[in-house]
Every structure is written in structure tokens, then in C-alpha cells.
């Protein structure tokens, strides 16, 4: 086994153990823990943002920076794809 | 890709307007019903990709250039960031919802609880939905179009 494969195996085992332990530590399915964030958004989303759809109020208002990052990712993907395939076209 | 048979072209032409209406409805009602700019833009781009598969990439690229799609995508991104910066100008912070509570447009605040949906609510969020929808339509369809055109064998023509 080469050194490269050995490192890959060690990394894989570490990741598998990490994911397994973290999946065991999740709270049980169907019993979500009540957090302050849920109540805050459910009670205030309609008053503060005027949105009947709570998910959109989170995506576009409370966490607008996240949407900005997604838009940047999409822009980068389009720019990369067009750059590569325009080169292949000629 | 030289397009498919006449049956496929006819069916794609008939279903294309319905897909467009559904996707634009999802974008326009993003602040009222499930969905939003990303989801509706993906639906519209899928409809455009259906036309692309049915009619072939050469025909489609004759109808719309990928340069115009790039311009549309950039316009969507600039609108989005401009709305965010206007929140900094008229309000207090970046991404401030400065239209809510105002009399201009989209300014009505609904009452708490499950109410009848009014499209004239939610401040700056519908405008951001439109900007993101434009960006996703142009971006996804641009990716599909340019990949289909680059993988076309053009030695037959």
C-alpha cells in the first residue's frame, strides 16, 4: 500500500468515526429540542418582515448574507463553466 | 444535438408555457407560498432546458446568445446587491428591510397568525426574489446551453 493510500484510509476512518459518533449524539427523531431561536422567528417574522412565508423571511431577511453567498457561488460557477467550454469550442 | 422528432418538439412547445407560468408564479409569490427565487428560477430554467433538448443546441443558440444570458445574470446580481446597499442607505444596516411599513410598495404588515395572503406585503423581499430568480434563470440556463453546445458534434453540418 502506497503512502498516499495509507493517508486516505486513515482520513476515511477518522471521518467515519466522527460521523458515526455525531449521529449518535443527535437528539431523537420527532422530538426537536425547543430553542429560543425558533420561538423568536415564529413569533416575530410576520410582524418584523411582513412575510407570511417564514422560510423566505429567514432566507432573504434574517440571513441575507447567506443568500448573497449563494448568489456569489452561482455566479462563480457560471463564469467558470463558460470560460472552460468557450475554450473547448474553438 | 440536432433536435428530436416532431412529436417531441410539439409536446415541448405545448408544455413550455405552462412550465413558465408555474415557475414565474413561484417566484412572484415567494413571500406567500413555499418557494422563492431559487426554486422558481430552477423550474423556469428546467423548462428552457426542455426546449433546448427538444430543438437542439444549435437552433437554441441561434435564438438566444449566451452573452445576453451573462448580461441578464449580472443584472440580477447587481439588483440584489443594490437592494441590500439601499437598506444601508435608507435604513440602518446592510440588508435592512427598508420598504416594510412604508406607503410606497409592498409595505403592508399582515396581522399575526394564519391570515389571508396579501401580495402587497413583505417590503423588499419580493424584489429580492425577482432579482435572485432572474439570476438563477440566466445562470442555470446559461450553464446548460453552453455545455450542450460545446458537446455538439458539428462535423455533420
Image (cartoon, coloured by chain):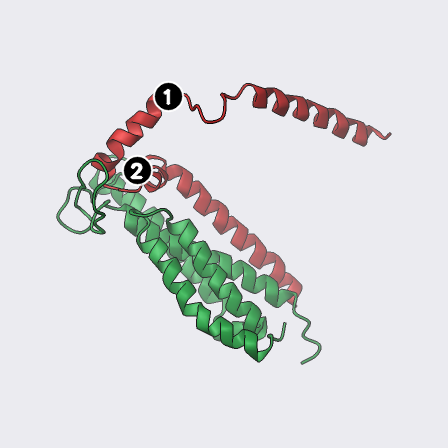
Q: Looking at the rendering, in which quadrant would you find the C terminus of chain A?
A: bottom right
Chain B: give its colour. Answer: green
Instruction: Give yes or no for contact between labels 2 and 1 (Cβ–Cβ under 8 Å).
Output: no
Query: Which residue is more in the foreground, A87 or B109?
Result: B109
Vertical placement of residue A12 versus B83, above or below: above
> In the drawing, what numbered circle is on residue B93?
none
Task: Tell me if residue B77 can be seen.
Answer: no
Q: Residues within 10 Å of mark 2 (few under 14, many from 20)?
A: some
Task: Please report, as a chain letter, where disc 1 is located.
Answer: A
**B127 left or right, relative to B132:** left
Alpha carbon separation for disc pair 2 and 1: 30 Å
The number of callouts visible is: 2
Establish if B132 lies above or below A20. below
Residue matched to label 1: A34
Q: Residue B157 is drawn in which quadrant?
A: bottom right
Residue B40 appears left or right of B3: left
Disc 2: which chain? Answer: B
Residue B63, percent from left and from top: 48, 75
Query: Mark 2 or mark 1, which is nearer to you?
Result: 1
Answer few, some or many: residues within 10 Å of disc 1's Cα (few below 14, many 20 plus, some between 14 and 19): few
Q: Position of residue A29 (x, y in %)?
A: 49, 26
Give the farthest residue toward the front.
A30
User: For the N terminus of chain A, which image quadrant?
Assistant: top right
Measuring from the top left, give residue B44's x and y in whole percent.
44, 60
Residue displayed at 20% across by 35% down = B112
Relative to A34, is B100 above or below?
A: below
Query: Does dot 2 land on a helix, a strand or a loop?
Result: loop
Residue on which disc 2 sits: B94
Query: What residue do we see at 52% from left, 21% from top?
Result: A26
State the image coordinates of residue A85 (x, y, percent, origin top left): 62, 60
Chain A drawn in what color?
A: red
Amino acid at each position: 500500500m502506497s503512502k498516499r493510500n495509507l493517508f486516505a484510509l486513515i482520513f476515511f476512518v477518522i471521518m467515519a468515526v466522527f460521523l458515526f459518533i455525531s449521529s449518535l449524539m443527535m437528539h431523537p427523531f420527532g422530538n426537536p429540542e425547543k430553542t429560543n431561536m425558533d420561538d423568536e422567528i415564529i413569533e416575530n417574522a410576520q410582524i418584523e418582515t411582513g412575510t407570511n412565508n417564514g422560510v423566505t423571511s429567514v432566507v432573504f431577511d434574517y440571513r441575507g448574507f447567506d443568500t448573497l453567498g449563494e448568489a456569489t457561488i452561482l455566479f462563480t460557477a457560471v463564469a467558470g463553466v463558460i470560460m472552460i467550454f468557450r475554450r473547448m469550442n474553438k | 444535438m440536432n433536435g428530436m422528432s416532431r412529436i417531441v418538439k410539439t409536446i415541448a412547445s405545448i408544455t413550455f408555457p405552462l412550465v413558465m407560468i408555474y415557475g414565474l408564479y413561484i417566484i412572484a409569490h415567494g413571500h406567500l407560498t413555499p418557494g422563492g427565487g431559487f426554486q422558481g428560477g430552477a423550474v423556469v430554467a428546467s423548462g428552457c432546458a426542455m426546449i433546448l433538448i427538444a430543438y437542439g443546441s444549435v437552433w437554441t443558440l441561434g435564438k438566444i446568445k449566451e452573452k445576453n444570458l451573462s448580461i441578464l445574470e449580472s443584472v440580477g446580481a447587481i439588483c440584489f446587491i443594490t437592494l441590500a446597499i439601499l437598506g444601508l442607505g435608507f435604513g440602518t444596516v446592510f440588508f435592512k428591510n427598508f420598504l416594510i411599513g412604508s406607503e410606497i410598495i409592498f409595505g403592508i404588515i399582515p396581522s399575526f397568525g394564519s391570515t389571508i395572503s396579501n401580495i402587497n406585503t413583505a417590503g423588499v423581499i419580493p424584489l429580492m426574489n425577482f432579482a435572485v430568480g432572474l439570476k438563477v434563470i440566466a445562470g442555470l440556463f446559461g450553464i446548460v446551453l453552453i455545455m450542450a453546445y460545446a458537446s455538439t458534434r458539428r462535423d455533420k453540418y
